[in-house]
Image: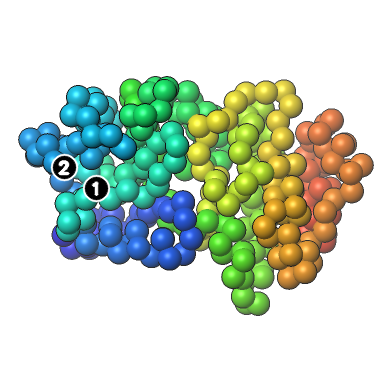
Amino acid sequence: MLLSWLASSRLGQHSWRSLVGRTGLIAIKKNLEVSTPIPLDELECNEPRLIQLSYPRPDPSYALTILGSLKQLGVDGVCFDPTDKIVMVGKGFRNIVVACTRRGEIVAAKIRRIDYVDKDAAREAAMLRMANEVGVGPRLLGSHGSALLMELIDGEDLTSWLLRLSENEREEAFRVLSDLLKQSFMLDRAGINHDELSDASKHVLRTDRGAVILDFGSAKITNRPSNLTSIINYLFHGPIRQVSLEILGMRKPPNESLRRYKSLLSWDAFVEIRGAVMALRCRSEV
């Protein structure tokens, strides 16, 4: 079982991710704790397991293609639960994300769905690599064909956490949201537009290390990035508006400050925005 293997390897230092709320995260952790990593050579000879790499339609040929990409990426095994189902830790309209092992660590393999038109993961990998260069996103480990390999993030979707925020978590909320604002600024400065951050509940996790922005499949290079303004819209116009205003006492920055930021994309303009949002709590940070 994977749980026993965790105790005897570096896997205990690493983690898993969820695109759902706390209940789903707990379920995924339990699945991983009782799962077994199946070596790729063994997986190749077991069609009922192998074809699960092809989602949502089982196709042996596509599954073998994915298996070949995982081998090229240095994956040692793919995790299966006790019912012989692949451990899927994320699912979207472009990809599924499955738990794998590589060099003694649990990692995440993001695999193109067979029913998605573009089967090449290279563009998303390039965007994630650029984001990593400015300290944003899960660490990219490589890509090949229709598969992208990255670190597996231990976290909960930001919205679910904020909606059940307790009084003693307020300071952590300020820390996580301040971190998210800074990461959004770093993406803006790099000219990378994530393009889906207005609904941060699907693309941002709260973790012990702060916020982690996920899913760069729609990201693009532009001279008019809008990551920071998208997060501000999320904070003050989305499902957590009441939390932002009433529980955390945050304030939407003045339109004049937002226009100045969009024009300059400078650190000083960002600090002004963040200071306004955080009621001046972060103005002195560097």
Residue closest to the far bottom: 167
Q: Residue at x 71, y 42 (%)?
A: 230
* Residue 116: quarter of image: top left
**Residue shown at 73%/70% (left/top)?**
247
Q: Write the residue at 66% across / 70% down.
A: 170
Instruction: Name the residue that disc number 2 marks.
Output: 49
Q: Which mark is residue 86?
A: 1
Which amino acid type is marked by label 2? Arg
Nearest to the observer: residue 236 or residue 68: 236
**Image x and y of residue 5, in percent:** 19, 58
In this rendering, does residue 65 appear at all?
yes
SS for callout 1:
loop
Left or right of 260 on screen, residue 217:
left
Three-letter code for the amino acid on which mark 1 is drawn: Ile
Judging from the image, what secondary structure is the residue with disc 2 in? Answer: helix
Question: Residue 52 in the image: x percent, y percent?
Answer: 23, 40
